[in-house]
Each structure stands twice: as structure tokens, then as C-alpha cells.
Image (cartoon, grey):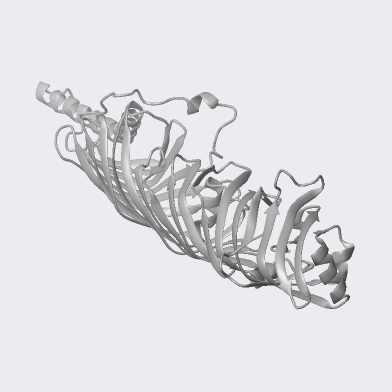
Amino acid sequence: MSLSSRSRLLVWLAVVVLVLGGGALAVRFWLGGYVVRTVLESAGASDVRFQGVRGTPWHLEIEGLSFQVETQAVAARRVTLDRPNWWMASLGAVRVEGLELPVFLDGSDVNPWNWNTYDNAPANGEAVQLPLTTIDLDGHIVVRMASLPDMPIAVKLEGRPKSGTSWIGSLVAEAPGFRLAGSGSLLRAGQELEFQVHSSELDLAVWSPQLQRLVTLPGAPWKLEGKLTAVGEGNVTAKRFASTARVSLRGGRMRVLSRDVSVEGAEADLEFSDLWKYRTKSGELRLAELRVGKLAVRDIQADIGLWGAQTIIVNAARGRALGGTMTVAPFRTRRDQRELLLKLEAIGLDAAQILALAPETPAQVGGRFDAVLPLRIMASGVRFEPGAVTLSPGGPGVIQLNAAAMLRSDAKLDEASTKTLKAVGKDPLRLRLSDLRLDIRSPDLPLGSSARVTFTGEGEDGPVAATLNVNGSIERYLEVLR
């Protein structure tokens, strides 16, 4: 039976509807994936992959998305795109769930076979149109370093357009021992960024291994405790990074694991005038105690600053030790220096506490002493540079020594002193000192001597004035870290 013209037309329309409908269903998932891949690649992404796409052109859900931006890997469990204007090259309103962004702070992700991928950088000053209308992001930044456990940081990011060429946003990042809250504005079509860090906290005990991988401390490894807090703000363009920050340390405790060196009650306040160049204004460092073996320096206050990532400037430092007060002349040092030269000035040191660090000293001394001692601090220990220790003016001093041993030594004695020592014989000799001076590594010392002791005193049997050279290294008498 032949069909009428009208019937044949209806049949053809049905076929067309079936073909178009089936074709639409067939290309639906392909088209969604094509849009995602095309938009991401136009924004600089590569190796775009996903497990599945479902939805409509104006509402897409991408499962298991991953891609690369230069050398940075990015992955997300689910990305939802609401695209009212689906025909445009835009992702629309983006909601990211389960973000995973690995960050290698020590550079251990460098691909040795593909160095050129680390040289690409965005063109300076070019306007960047973000291929989206809003963004809501929830996921983790994973801090990774070689041979250390991963440290995931939960992040929440929100971004909204403020005008046709600017965006505003907020960021909250949290992890065990870490928290940061900030906001920012992306201006002039991405050519300028203004940011504010409203609050941030870092627990040194939790992040100690990572911090010591980034900043090598002398005598490492250390055990670190305490809390760092900071606020800051800045402005970033293609040609300039201007930022400031205020950083504080409270409850600081530090200990060298391989040696008996520790710090208690550390507090610090620093203001970075240029965060990008690691430059600060003069700040204050306070230590309740710095202990090096048997030597404890307490109530330390220092005026310090940074001039770059390597240089530390100390404008003044003072503290209490050995019964007296100590000050250090201004100096600067670099983190990669292998030795440090300090000019130490001390007033009112207690002789008994000094001798506790040098128990093999052949004489017993009492009283208060002043000192000017340049110290060269090295990994192998401390060396005294040319300096002097003298009896404090107006203070009483005493010395007790073996008279017979003094006569047998190569000490320089006048006639009266020799007579007094012979009169004492084998008994201990106790003198009331009128003067005592220890000259360390003065240029007129004989070869093989490191110091000279000169003293004058009065005993029951008469006066004694003597000059005695210290043969060998004077540092061998110290037992600070032994």
C-alpha cells in the first residue's frame, strides 16, 4: 500500500527526530568534555584528563579531573560548572570539590630530563581574562618534601567579579599547627594583585622538619617549639612585588639534638619592610636563657634585623652570665658563614663561676672581673682572639696558689716576691690582689704561649708580683661542652 505525501512527510520527520535526538545523546558527553578540555587548554593547561562528564551544556559535572599548568599538577574529585551562556568559551560559575594541589617546597619535584619546562613564565604585563564567572573551591594543598611525610593543608577559596576587569576573593587555609586567613583583589584584568593576610599561625613543633629543610640552622638538627603569628599585606604586578608583614614569636624553645645547646623562653617581634627581599626594620629578640653546656646566659635582649634571606644584623645584644653582665658589639653574619667573630664585653664577672668552667686552673681566684674578649665561634669550638680580663676597679680580689710550684715555674718574679714565696714554703699562699690582668694572644707573647697572667698582691709574709705565660692553648682549660 503506498503512503500518501502527508504520511511520508511524517515518517521522515520521525526519522530526523530520532537521528537528532540520538545524536544529541551520543555527543552530549563528548561535547561536555570538549568544552572542559578546550577552555582549560586555552588558559595554559595541558594533559587534561577526567573520568567522566555528565549534565547538559549549561550544567556540567566533571568527575576525577586532572591537568598540568607548566610543572604544577592539579587534581579534583568533582568540578561543577553552571554555564548559563553555554555557547561561550567560559567555564561559568565553578565549584571545585576535593582539590589536591601538591607543592614541593624543596624543589624535589624537578624533572631532570625536562628542564625547559621550568623556564616557561607568563608574559610580563599581559592582561589575563579568567575563563569563569565565579569560583568556590574546597580541597587540600599538599606540602611535600623529599624523605618527609606529606602535610595536607585544607583550603577554602571564594572568588567573585567586582567589575569587568577586577575580582575579589577570600582564602582560609588550615592544617595541624597552621592557620591562615586572607583576602585579595585581582585588578586590571589580572595584571595586579592586592592581598591582605588578616591572621596566620604556625606551630614550630609540628612544622619543625619542614622549616629546617628550608632554613639550615647551625648545629642542626634542632628541636623547635613555639608559635609564630603574622599579619601582612602587599601589591603584586609583573614588575613589582611590594609587601610588608609583622611577625611575632612566643613561647619559643629550641634545642640542638646532637649537642648540649638550648634556648628557653624565646620571644621576637619583627616588621618586614620588604617581604619579597626578606628585609626588616630593627626588631627585638628576647631569650630567657641560652645554655651552652655549663654556661648559661640569661635575660638576653637583642636588637636584630634581616637584610635579605642570608644576612642577619645584630645592632646590640646584652645578657647576664657568670654573675655579671655581658654586651656584644654590633655585627652582621650570613647564614652560610662557617664562623662568627663576636666582640664580647663583660662587667662584674664572678671569679668562682668562671673557674667552674675551668676546673684544672692551677690557682684559686676570688673577686669580680671585667673582660673584653673577641670570640671566634666555629663548628669545632670557640677560640679567643686578642683580648684581656682585668680585676674590676675598686673590687676586692684574692688568689690562692702553690708557692713552691710558683718558684719552680718560669714566672718572672722580683726579689721581694721570691723572698715571700720561699718564706711560705710548701704551704698555700693567699694574696689580697691589688691588680690582676690576663692578656690573651697579645702580639708580644713568646712563641708557643697563648696568654699572660700578671698580678700583684699582699700576703701575710709579704708582697708578691708575678708575670706568668700560659703555654699552649688557653682554650684547653675550658670545660663548657665536655
> Left or right of 109: which side holds 30?
left
393 lies above or below 335? below
| Residue farthest along the left direction in this orientation | 6
Image coordinates of residue 50 in percent, x first then y, are 41, 39
Q: Quadrant of the N terminus?
A: top left
Q: Nearer the viewer, residue 362 or 481?
A: 362
Residue 183 seen from this side: yes
Q: Nearer the viewer, residue 301 or 115?
A: 301
Q: Nearer the viewer, residue 301 or 4?
A: 301
Tally the numbered discs: 0
27 lies above or below 443? above
Residue 259 seen from this side: no
Image coordinates of residue 226 in percent, x first then y, are 46, 63
Q: Quadrant of the C terminus?
A: bottom right
Q: Residue at x 47, y 33 (%)?
A: 71
Image coordinates of residue 403 in percent, x first then y, are 84, 71
Q: Residue at x 15, y 24 (%)?
A: 8
Q: Nearer the viewer, residue 112 or 293?
A: 293
> Left or right of 415: which side holds 395?
left
> Left or right of 20: which side holds 335?
right
- The image quadrant of residue 292 is bottom right
- The image quadrant of residue 191 is top left
Image coordinates of residue 384 in percent, x first then y, are 67, 51
